[in-house]
Image: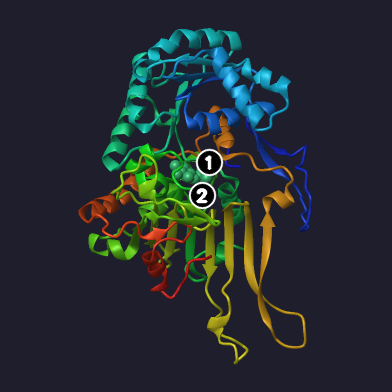
Amino acid sequence: MPADAGLPNAKLTDQQDPPQISAPVKVTLHQLFCMEATAAPCGIVIIGASGDLAHRKLLPGLYHLYKVKLLPKEFFILGAARSPGDDAGFRDQIEAAFKEKGETDGATLRGFLEHVYYRSVQYAQLGTLESPLKEFALKHATQGKLLFHIATPPEVYESAIASLSQAGLIGKGKNAAVIIEKPFGYDLDSARRLNRLLLANLDESQIYRIDHYLGKETVQNILMFRFANSIFEPVWNRRYIDHVQITAAESIGIEHRAGFYEKAGNLRDVFQNHMFQLLSTVAMEPPVVLDQDQYRNEKLKVIRSLRPIPAEKLNEMVVRGQYGSGAIDGTPVAAYRQEEGVNPASTTETFVAMKLFIDNWRWEGVPFYLRSGKRLARGVTEIAIQFKQVPHSMIPAFPADQFSPNVLTFRLQPQEGISLSFEAKQPGTKFCMTTLDMAFNYKDVFRKSSMEAYERLLLDAMQGDQTLFVREDMNDLSWAFMTTILKGWEQSPPGNFPNYAAGSWGPREAQALIEKDGRAWRK
Ligand code: BG6
């Protein structure tokens, strides 16, 4: 998809090897145009390699890329972290974990592990990696290109970047780039400080701020859906759309991440990044060319057009919540305040709902309702576009406002797909109406499962394509919006936490946020 046509290795092709299709719905692939690109030789340095992210996402992602031959032959991976260890121990750990997850192809795994190394290092002394990096670069013929993936806790981002720079491992104009994990900052000031540090040592073109939501297949498909078809764009505006709902509901809790989550909370963890990326993707204007600048310019304009939330309207437009004890799928679960490592009087929010307006020609007056939370009834992430009701009913006994409005849904989780609901007549002698769904499910249609978001993004970073990474200005604007809310919250700490039961759909105030407008959250 949005690969920069200017990439050295990218070419537009008629796909030679079309994906395997099974067709519960009729699928006709008239012609497949694909942007193909192979990654250039490089050394990948995972800083924070003993952490959860490295073992859950980065190493499995890189291994899968290796397996499907999307990594170049000339690559190496150096894991660096404070924990003691060596190459053999790190490789054994990876091998055991992959085998436990069902990997049976021992030969391929051993081949991959020959490219993998480990060094124990303090994050303020990353210069000690210089000599092993030279050695591995020579051995694997990577031609000197380095990609540093900073996957440490955010508290050490600054010292890691400073020490890489002091050692001359990164620098403007050098053949080195940095991938940095969210959260990029804690509020507007800290985000700007981190940015200044990055930009003092690197050009923006060498910085890859990762938001894994941008690597999700459905998120990319929103662009194709909107701008590669001619029938949707004419109705994609205030004249036809009643409102938009974006939901990122998780049934899981904080999963041993109390240390991080207590300081972050839902607004910083999910809204500042994932939710605003979804919002801007669904609401953006069509970019003239799908390249990294124009795509990100259009998304930025959406965030710039958000109607500010004045302090006196904060409670009317934004709801925060924290889960109490409850049950998920019949299994009792503890309250947030009882989770290990959480302050028993914590005021950290585990749920946020928000009503937003985008003040531009396309969206004037259309509310966007966003909600996200932990320990909700079900894990589901989706964007639902609800169209306006029919203006008139031709059946007098059935008033127009009783027709279910059409809803177009992009589902990111649990099963990626797109569906459109519409009214139809039930078969029979009477006029009985029913709501039907035209649904497209990735897994049912394309037998190949989607590439994991991280794989896609790691590959893009190796190819030098920043389209699906967060640009500095987007991060800044998004933090500016969130910081106003955070400051407002600081002035009035929540007095009613916990205010929703685990396993419910969030606090009562979140229902009221939408119901007072005569609308309802999707179930
Ligand atoms: C992460 C958040 O960025 O996204 C987590 O830190 C959250 O708290 C996760 O659970 C959700 O990602 P996904 O891909 O499971 O929706």
Looking at numbered disc 2 in the image, what kind of residue is underneath it? Pro
Name of the residue lying farthest toward the left: 491
Bin the neighbour count of mark 1 within 10 Å (Cα to Cα): few under 14, some 14-19, many 20 and up: many
Above/below status of 283 relative to 366:
above
Residue 18 x/y as whole percent: 77, 41
In which image quadrant can residue 501 be found?
Answer: bottom left
- Name the residue: 62% across, 89% down: 395
Residue 392 x/y as whole percent: 56, 85
- Name the residue: 47% across, 28% down: 51
In which image quadrant can residue 457 be found?
Answer: top right
Above/below status of 19 relative to 147:
below
Bin the neighbour count of mark 2 within 10 Å (Cα to Cα): few under 14, some 14-19, many 20 and up: some
Name of the residue lying farthest toward the bottom: 396
Looking at numbered disc 1 in the image, what kind of residue is underneath it? Asp
Label 1 to label 2: alpha-carbon separation: 8 Å
Observer-nearest residue: 91 or 139? 91
- Name the residue: 42% across, 47% down: 270
- What residue sits right under mark 1 in the picture? 291
